[in-house]
Image (cartoon, grey):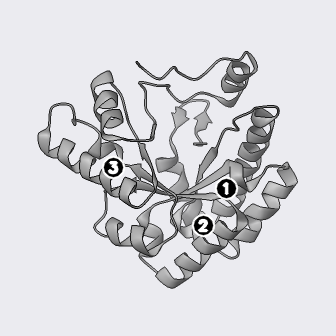
Amino acid sequence: ALARWVHPELGAIGPDRFIPIAEETGLILPLTTAILRRAFVAARDWNRGREQPLRMAVNLSPRLFLCGDIVAHVAGLLVEAGLSPSHVEMEVTETVFLGDSDRAVTILRAFKALGVSLAMDDFGTGYSSLSYLSRFPFDIIKIDRSLVTGIEHDEEMAMIARAVISLGQSLRKTVVAEGVENQAQFDFLRYQGCDEFQGYLLSRPLPEAELTRLLASGGVIAKVPA
């Protein structure tokens, strides 16, 4: 679930522009609450009657992650929506550890106890990602798109992506590649053992209503390329 602000004059505005403003103005909690409430209700409806439930992935900003009792807040929203925690993935970046790392690990463990999956987003963009994998209870590694772009013709990038996937396999993490935009990237990543993929090759971001119609018709976002 990735929020976009659809402005009547400026069009779709990405979260990289309005989330920092929400954090600075103290509006990040009510904004995120509204986003999570809508996402959880949508996931509940989409999963109704499905043999293999979809996993709703949601991002938590660093400031919100360390704000108050975020775990209890999320738990309350899950109960309100009637959605199982096992159908939710909470995504954070390593910036949540740059301040109070002890508090961060306490919060992560509380989320694990709640039953949600935990993902390290944008893996490979910071200096300490490797140490965080061994110290914190992540289930999923999401390879940043900067490590995917160019792997089909840049041997050094390919070696880095290969190493990250191998590391994830060794640690028994689910490895997700972000920003997969062409068949060559997909083929390379799948051959290396990457578990899941995101990117325009499979689907562009879809509005909630469009995805709801697609799922209701028995369709899929995209067939996995052969």
Q: Element under label 3?
A: helix
Going by the image, does 32 lie left or right of 94?
Answer: right
Q: Residue at x 35, y 28 (%)?
A: 181
Q: What residue type is labelled 1?
A: Thr
Give the mark nearer the N terminus: 1 vs 2.
1
Q: Which residue carries the number 1 mark?
A: 32
Can I make out residue 27 in this image? Answer: no
Q: What residue type is labelled 2?
A: Leu
Q: Which residue carries the number 3 mark?
A: 165
Q: Are the residues at dot 1 and dot 2 in contact (C-beta closer than 8 Å)?
A: yes
Task: Give how far apart the Cα atoms at labels 3 and 1 are.
Answer: 31 Å
How crowded is the residue under tag 1: few (<14 C-alpha within 10 Å), some, or many (20+)? some
How crowded is the residue under tag 2: few (<14 C-alpha within 10 Å), some, or many (20+)? some
Can I make out residue 93 in this image? Answer: yes
Q: In which quarter of the image is residue 191?
A: top left
Give the mark nearer the N terminus: 3 vs 2.
2
Coordinates of residue 29 in the picture (x, y in percent):
68, 63
Going by the image, does 181 lie left or right of 90?
Answer: left
Q: Which residue carries the number 2 mark?
A: 64
Coordinates of residue 192 in the picture (x, y in percent):
30, 40
Coordinates of residue 12 in the picture (x, y in percent):
54, 33
Q: Residue furthest left?
A: 155
